[in-house]
Image (spheres, helix red, strand yellow):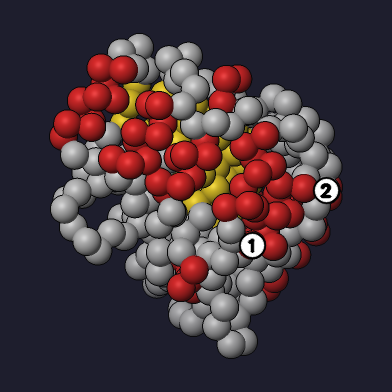
């Protein structure tokens, strides 16, 4: 499963779990690692505010460049609005922060569609020098669950943005599309399925396919969708494609129909990478792709049975 393990690397740095390093008395230099701050199962008596304060008091926060938020709740999921304000309040103590991962929570700790999120707009507003942001989770539309939210905005420095979700809400997809990200080079959206809150439509993807507000975009990922074939057909004609070096249509229910649309559309030979992992392509179509794109590194791993009538995405619940 894609979200079964904690991140081992983030923003080009190895991830160090603060709690573990503190217990061992083996703390690396503050700027040499991406710091993961999160509760462990054995920390029954420790609350996240205490752990966060210990992090700020122990590690030189002025030198921290990358931060990974782990589990901030003990047992039952609590909304990110319980922990995010603490991070935002410490922004002036972390002037070097350039990368933030919200939230490195595995499926064992909480299923991705049960992670209760909140409005992440303040992250962009509070960290104007942020270069990379990963957001995992967007609680499905269950009663009394907080959901992921975003308001359209402009951010001058962001270079990489990824939303990981089993179902990305349409308002969030539209908000991302309405944002101005002049420096953004890499955008990945795990679109997910309607049954877990992914009520986006193909029309909502138009801003990413045009790339009009993404002048620096080099890698586009529209992933984890049941309608991966229809997305592939749109991508095949999308104005943004000629300036991409990387394209990801992975993790979804891509079949020979979608792959054929890609091959029959505009040229893709300029790409460096084409990520199609977790797919329903026949061996014949896989070979067609390799033959047609000999200079492109194509990821065709995690092949599912093309004859299976029940096709599923890689990440949903």
Q: Residues within 10 Å of mark 1 (few under 14, many from 20)?
A: some
Residue found farthest to the bottom? 143
Residue under numbered circle 1: 170
* Quadrant hosting residue 294: top left
- Closer to us: 297 or 19: 297
Residue that appears at 81% across and 34% down: 156
Residue 70 appears in the rendering = no
Residue that appears at 25% across and 46% down: 280
**Element under label 2?**
loop
Q: Residues within 10 Å of mark 2 (few under 14, many from 20)?
A: some
Residue found farthest to the front? 264
Residue 168 appears in the rendering = yes
Residue under numbered circle 2: 153
Look at the numbered discs 1 and 2 and tell me whether their residues touch, using CB distance below 8 Å.
Answer: no
Between the residue at mark 1 and the residue at mark 2, the CA separation in whole angstroms equals 17 Å
Q: Is residue 284 left or right of residue 87?
A: left
Q: Earlier in the sequence, mark 1 or mark 2?
A: 2
**Numbered tag placed on residue 143 in the rendering:** none
Picture coordinates of residue 87 (x, y %)? Answer: 72, 57
Picture coordinates of residue 92 (x, y %)? Answer: 83, 47
Residue that appears at 64% across and 76% down: 146
The answer to whether 24 is drawn above or below residue 216 in the figure is: below
């Amino acid at each position: 499963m894609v979200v079964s393990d904690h991140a081992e690397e983030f923003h080009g740095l190895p991830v160090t779990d603060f709690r573990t390093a503190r217990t061992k008395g083996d703390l690396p230099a503050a700027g040499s690692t991406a710091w993961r701050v999160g509760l462990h199962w054995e920390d029954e008596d420790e609350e996240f505010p205490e752990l966060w304060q210990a992090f700020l008091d122990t590690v030189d926060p002025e030198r921290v460049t990358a931060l990974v938020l782990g589990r901030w709740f003990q047992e039952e999921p609590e909304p990110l609005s319980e922990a995010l304000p603490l991070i935002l309040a410490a922004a002036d103590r972390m002037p070097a922060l350039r990368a933030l991962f919200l939230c490195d929570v595995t499926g064992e700790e909480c299923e991705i569609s049960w992670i209760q999120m909140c409005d992440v707009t303040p992250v962009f507003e509070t960290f104007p020098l942020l270069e990379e942001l990963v957001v995992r989770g967007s609680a499905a539309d269950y009663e009394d669950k907080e959901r992921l939210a975003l308001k359209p905005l402009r951010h001058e420095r962001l270079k990489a943005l990824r939303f990981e979700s089993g179902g990305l809400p349409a308002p969030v997809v539209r908000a991302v599309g309405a944002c101005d990200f002049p420096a953004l080079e890499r955008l990945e959206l795990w679109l997910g399925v309607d049954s877990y809150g992914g009520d986006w439509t193909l029309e909502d993807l138009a801003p990413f396919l045009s790339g009009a507000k993404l002048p620096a975009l080099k890698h586009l990922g529209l992933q984890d969708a049941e309608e991966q074939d229809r997305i592939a057909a749109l991508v095949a004609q999308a104005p943004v494609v000629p300036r991409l070096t990387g394209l990801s249509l992975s993790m979804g229910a891509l079949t020979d129909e979608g792959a054929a649309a890609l091959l029959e559309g505009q040229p893709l030979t300029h790409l460096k990478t084409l990520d199609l992992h977790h797919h329903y392509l026949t061996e014949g179509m896989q070979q067609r792709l390799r033959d047609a794109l000999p200079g492109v590194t194509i990821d065709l791993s995690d092949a599912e049975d093309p004859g299976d009538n029940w096709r599923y995405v890689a990440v949903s619940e």
